[in-house]
Image (cartoon, coloured by chain):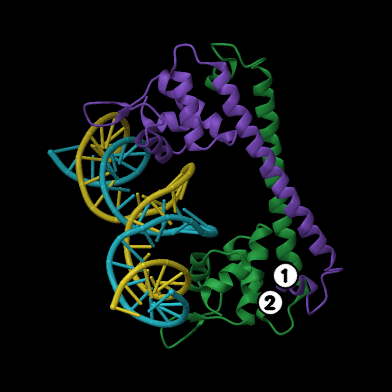
Chain colours: A purple, B green, C cyan, D yellow
Amino acid sequence: MRIGQLSAECDCPVETIRYYEKIGLLPQAVRRANGYRSYDEMHRKWLQFILRSRALGFNQDEVRRLTDLAHQQRPACADVYKLLDEHINNVLSKVRELKRMQQALSRLQAQCHDGTLHDCPVIDELMG
Amino acid sequence: MRIGQLSAECDCPVETIRYYEKIGLLPQAVRRANGYRSYDEMHRKWLQFILRSRALGFNQDEVRRLTDLAHQQRPACADVYKLLDEHINNVLSKVRELKRMQQALSRLQAQCHDGTLHDCPVIDELMG
DNA sequence: GCTTGACCTTGTAGTAACTACAGGGTCTAG
DNA sequence: CTAGACCCTGTAGTTACTACAAGGTCAAGC
């Protein structure tokens, strides 16, 4: 399978696949005689592993640790659990932060009344 | 007031102040004979405006639009309201996205049972 | 045989929003 | 007169890609 097909199957841009290979997240593709990258099922699995992890919000470093764990012959669940737990906490604090923002924004918005005023109270509030 | 004092008063790194000036968010500082930047209350107000906006999650482009609106002699509340409304929607969709992640992560974590297993089911699930 | 077009290659530069130097100048206190 | 705190500029690094530019490869059609 060439890179275009892998890209289509995994719904991941070609550039991203090359990028993951370059930074060592994805195992190196085998090269054909003409220099084209050649992929098999194993590569597809790894790419999907990465994409799923990214979709769950893991950053590159965390994905790397996950793939390292996954590469072990008997992945230690305790290590994965720890990574997962830390990440869930990070996600939860982001949610809290965003909710805090959202409430502050809604309070600000409420001062706009009908949004028809001039000399906006929101601007005044932000100026302090 | 020199940059260090402004930095301390606004709890904002010196580099960030210089950066905001460079990208044109913060009005240019007056320069003393020795080349040092000199700030007054007006600058402090603007910096705090920017910092408050950033703390509410507005990005640089949005902050720029906010400061542009704020610079008007009679800021149009309707425009501010629109910006605010769009931003609140962005924040809300980020919250939804993160909650979706969090639920998926918790479901994954639940498969870990006590986190003592080898041959981790989480890895298996991510591999698909 | 030749060209067209889809596909592939590399490498570099751009994005957001800063942060971290390196290499230097200025000023005040001891 | 020197040590230390402060200031200056400019450049490079960060994250996680994305977007070219400039070129090579290959199959199909004329």
Q: Nearer the viewer, mark 1 or mark 2?
A: 1
Chain of the residue where label 1 is placed in the rendered structure:
A
C-alpha distance separating marks 1 and 2 = 9 Å
x and y percent of residue B73 in the render?
71, 85
Q: As displayed, is residue B46 above or below residue A55?
A: below
Task: Please rate how many residues cluster around mark 2, counting C-alpha atoms within 10 Å: few if below 14, some from 14 to 19, many from 20.
Answer: many
Task: Please rate how many residues cluster around mark 1, counting C-alpha atoms within 10 Å: few if below 14, some from 14 to 19, many from 20.
Answer: some
Question: For this view, does D29 lie left or right of residue B118?
Answer: left
Q: As displayed, is residue D20 above or below residue D16?
A: below
Q: As displayed, is residue A116 above or below residue B103?
A: below
Q: Say what amino acid the circle numbered 1 marks.
A: Leu
Residue of label 2: B70
Say which quadrant the N terminus of chain A sits in.
top left
Chain of the residue where label 2 is placed in the rendered structure:
B
Residue A42: which quarter of the image?
top left
Query: Tags 1 and 2 in contact by the CB under 8 Å rule?
Result: yes
Q: Nearer the viewer, residue D19 or B37?
A: B37
